[in-house]
Image: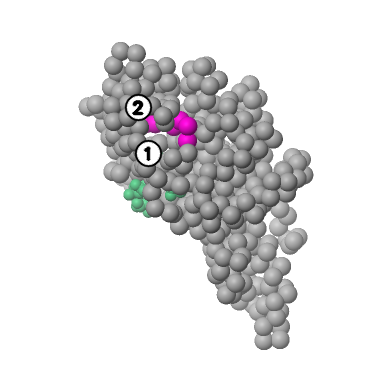
Amino acid sequence: MAELWAIPDDPLLPELRAFASRHRLGERGRALDRSPEFPRAEFRALGEAGWLGLTVRPGLGGRGLPPSRAAVLLFHLGYLGGTVFAKLSLQPEFSSVLSDHGSPKAVEEWFRPMLRGERLVGNQITEAQAGSDATALATTVTRDGGSYVLNGEKTEVAMAGDTEAAIVYARAPGTSGHDGISAFLVPQDLPGVHRTVEAMDLGERWQRRGSVRYDHVAVPADLRLGEEGAGFRYVLPELAQDRGLLAAVYLGVARASWDETVRYVGQRVAFRRPLSDQQSVAFALVDDGLRLETAWMFALRALSRLPEGAAGAAETGLAKALATEVALATIDHAIQFHGGRGYSGALPHEQRWRDVRSGSIAHGPSEVLYRAAARQLWPRGSAGNP
Ligand SMILES: Cc1cc2nc3c(=O)[nH]c(=O)nc-3n(C[C@H](O)[C@H](O)[C@H](O)COP(=O)(O)OP(=O)(O)OC[C@H]3O[C@@H](n4cnc5c(N)ncnc54)[C@H](O)[C@@H]3O)c2cc1C
């Protein structure tokens, strides 16, 4: 609609738009809010069409797009269908510890089928006493012959009842902090796995979050991912890329609300003038557009710095924090300027706000991401960061 800030473009966009229209992603995303379930048919369709794991290397069956191009397509998945399909697209990226460190058999049996939308693998790090500070996790793992035995409980888990397997992080007894944490691929139908789907969330209800308890679960040793004790080291680069790509998703969702609002206020008449004639409305929308564009440019810049390690990771964390904040403020204005209908479920804005709201908590709360950035300014042990 508005020409001031051109929407990001990519040669694959016509194909993606045709896919979204064929599968009615917009309507389906809205329906999943009212009747939450894991959208298995769409997951499969996304996989068949090659929209899952956009950055996954071709050797594993992916498109191998650079993060900057994946970001554009995820922006558009967010724009066209809300957060849900973009997050489905990211499931393989959320499982890079499996693709990078799993045995060839585990990759063949779990990762490749996930890329085709046939099998769903989740992630389980969080525990009741270990969320922002994942190094406090207490689930234990002990070697017993050809298996590892898991004991503990994971909480806040997305798709708790829907995943066929999960990447589970657990520590050797007697270890603390980063040390001793290993990653395992755990089929969720093993004896001793108890899954509970909990109360309905504010948004992204299709995720049907819950908890998973492990009571003496024997995990075959060949499902350990990489080296013993290296789990935490493996997941950090994954999180760094995920955060930059999630920023793109939230900005795409918010841009949809912004475009619709710009269109609407030019037509809606109140006090004999279009709403767009009111400076308080027009300036707010200009400011939102400017901030969306700024956050987008920053997200792309941050993604380009990923190879630089900790500094790049700090920037993608900030990109997610900034994108979430800007997106929520933009969607809030969309609700406001659409008036009573904006507040209602008749329009998509209130759901978009609820869905995007998770962005400042999941994959690292914003405060924790600012803390990581501060550590780049004042390295640990310096006067500013004792
Ligand atoms: C939609 C959604 C999906 C999720 N999916 C998964 C999943 O699939 N698997 C999984 O393992 N986890 C998942 N999580 C959990 C998520 O990773 C945690 O909720 C998150 O890490 C925060 O942990 P916590 O909830 O224990 O909050 P806490 O660690 O208790 O923190 C609570 C709040 O305190 C503040 N805070 C924390 N630390 C600091 C600090 N150092 N400085 C300043 N303020 C601070 C922040 O505002 C934070 O939100 C999901 C969460 C959501 C919302």
Asked which secondary structure carries label 2, the reply is loop
Give the colour scheme shown. Answer: one colour
For image coordinates 63% across by 21% down, the residue present is 59
Q: Counting other residues with Cα less than 10 Å from the Cα at mark 2, is it few (<14), some (14-19), or many (20 or more)? A: few
Q: Quadrant of the C terminus?
A: top left
* Type of amino acid at the residue the image marks with label 1: Arg
In space, the residues marked 2 and 1 are separated at their CA atoms by: 12 Å
Quick check: 59 left or right of 111?
right
Whole-percent x, y for residue 104 in the image: 52, 16
* Type of amino acid at the residue the image marks with label 2: Pro
In the displayed structure, 166 sits above or below 10; it is: above
For image coordinates 52% across by 34% down, the residue present is 120
Quick check: 259 left or right of 168?
right
Tell me the quarter of the picture where residue 330 sits. bottom right
Residue 146 in view:
yes
For image coordinates 28% across by 27% down, the residue present is 216
Magenta stretch: give its range: 163-170
In this rendering, the count of numbered labels is: 2
Whole-percent x, y for residue 194 in the image: 34, 36
Tell me, yes or no, whether the highlighted magenta stretch contains residue 376: no
In the displayed structure, 245 sits above or below 175; it is: below
Tell me the quarter of the picture where residue 179 sits. top left
Where is mark 1, residue-wise?
195
Asked which secondary structure carries label 1, the reply is strand
In the displayed structure, 265 sits above or below 72; it is: below
Q: Quadrant of the N terminus?
A: bottom right
Is most of the magenta stretch helix, strand or loop? strand
Residue 183 in view:
no
Whether pointer 2 and pointer 1 mark residues with C-beta atoms closer than 8 Å, the reply is: no
Q: Counting other residues with Cα less than 10 Å from the Cα at mark 1, is it few (<14), some (14-19), or many (20 or more)? A: some
In the displayed structure, 8 sits above or below 231; it is: below
